[in-house]
Amino acid sequence: MMALHCILVLWLFSGWAVGYKQGDNVTLYVNKVGPYHNPQETYHYYTLPVCSPEKVHHKSLSLGEVLDGDRMAESLYHIQFRENAEKKTLCQLTLSDKQVDQLREAIEELYYFEFVLDDIPVWGFVGYIEESGFLPHSHKVGLWTHLDFNLEFNGDSVIFANVSVKDVKPVPLEEGAGAAVGGVGVGGGGLTVTHTYSVHWFESSLPHSRRAERLRDYSFFPKTLEIHWLSIINSLVLVLLLLGFVIIILMRVLKNDFARYNVEEEGGCDDLDQGDNGWKIIHTEVFRFPPYKSLLCAVLGVGAQFLTLATGIIIMALLGMFNVHRHGAINSAAIVLYALTSCVSGYVSCSFYTQISGQRWVWNIILTSSLFSAPLFLTWSVVNSIHWWSGSTQALPATTVLLLLGAWVLVGFPLTVIGGIMGKNRAGSFQAPCRTRNIPRQIPPQPWYKHTAVHMAIGGFLPFSAISVELYYIFATVWGREHYTLYGILLCVFAILLSVGACISVALTYFLLSGEDYRWWWRSILSTGSTGLFIFVYSVFYYRNRSSMSGLVQTTEFFGYSLLTALVFSLMLGSVSFWASLTFIRYIYRSLKMD
């Protein structure tokens, strides 16, 4: 708990302004480099043959920054507040043939670098590549050895920072380190280059509290996120029409059913089978407990946990707790909330498990705690191993792994157990309007359109269509370099998703019961929970048609965590659809006149 408290303190105070006096040193941290089109494939800046201190001093990072692949270290750049500098020498390097080839390969793969100055990210390309002509073909690769830092200030704070190479000629990197080229010498069989930099300060009228707006307007990476109200309104109208259609049709059908079934008010609950058909005839079967009760309750518990987690993250974002200068703030918040909301999963799962006459409550708690954490650990192990093998900064250090493991062992799992015990002790009896017979009723043959696969296709596609527009922007944020700020729209889409899932589940459950099939328990979870499958299929489409990602490292991480995302949506929507179906079934059977 102390570790989690420290994380929250660091996170909450990371956005405070730092006041400088003229001439004060402004530390520039080097962070990471990587291919432009593979956002999650990053390496430490000093893995390239660049100017580096004899002893590297790393900055203390928060958990969210480490999870984001940040590895900040002090640089050799000497920048003083509000003091310009012209073409200062950083260092002189003699590159071997191997190092030249390493730089050439990095430049050909469009490597970019990321520096951090006063919590402001600064991006630029390592070098320059030019392809021209067909016959003869020209292939030129050059290294940027001079950087111009353009810094904006207001009063005693830094507002914005960027780097440019305007009016600077790149140093050609010839195969095998070639001959000397202007400003570059050959010594000892290697290529000698001199790295320089300039610093220019500009006064800005933008206050420190609004400097995030300046960063959002900067366009080093392609801009794909815009306020897309027209698309959202279109989706909202379609969803409202769909919900209205489902609700009106169901109400009219149910009204006719109630009028027909309640004509005879005499007779007990056991006499209603004679002469009836449809959902009323299975009133003695519809509340028969399903198989695999422990797994079903675990799904409901973990789904409720992710509902709480997602709602908490969105509310915190709406309150302004996340901004572009708080590196990894959402990651830190998600880790903390996941651990703290474990009690929700334990309570919901064990409470309902006890209600439906479950006996092995200890096993139920263990299953609940491992239903998501086990796939997460397995996926992370594979992805992290590949990152470690490639030397990527996305590979978590041992201390971070121990911290995360400790958070789950010391906080997450105990809270699951505590929630499970509280749920077991506070669980009442299962509320069923009709009693269940001892001998199950035979289920008549069902038409093809009432099979599980068809219901999963319908129940998964409709919620997916409601979020398909916003899903692109979310993918562009998670798997790109955009900063998502449209949290109000995200809240609307989240509410639409849950509403559509609940209504579709109720409609499909009614059609299932009208065919005298009482196996609705698992069917209600699978029907809307299949939205996760559509999201994974969309991730494949996004990878192939909407991104330029490639390589083993990026591909493994993308599909590994896309699978986990699909699982989260399946658990969350499956839980919502189940409770909606259960509430609907209790309502219709309680409304019948069965004295």
Image (tube, grey):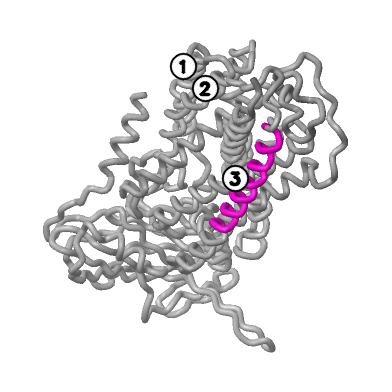
Q: CA distance from mark 1 to mark 2?
A: 7 Å
Residue 340 shown left or right of residue 353 in the figure: left
Residue matched to label 3: 503
Q: Left or right of 464: which side holds 317? A: left
Are dots 1 and 2 in contact, CB under 8 Å? yes
Q: Quadrant of residue 82?
A: bottom left
Position in image of residue 193 (x %, y %)? 42, 68
From the image, tell me which residue sits under label 2.
346
Image position of 215 with respect to 523: above or below: below
**Three-letter code, disc 3:** Cys
Q: Quadrant of residue 568?
A: top right
Circle 1 residue: 418
Who's the residue at 48% across and 14% down the image? 426
State which region is magenta.
239-262
The extreme right residue here reads: 445
Q: Is residue 441 visible?
A: yes
Q: Mark 1, mark 3: which one is toward the viewer?
A: 3
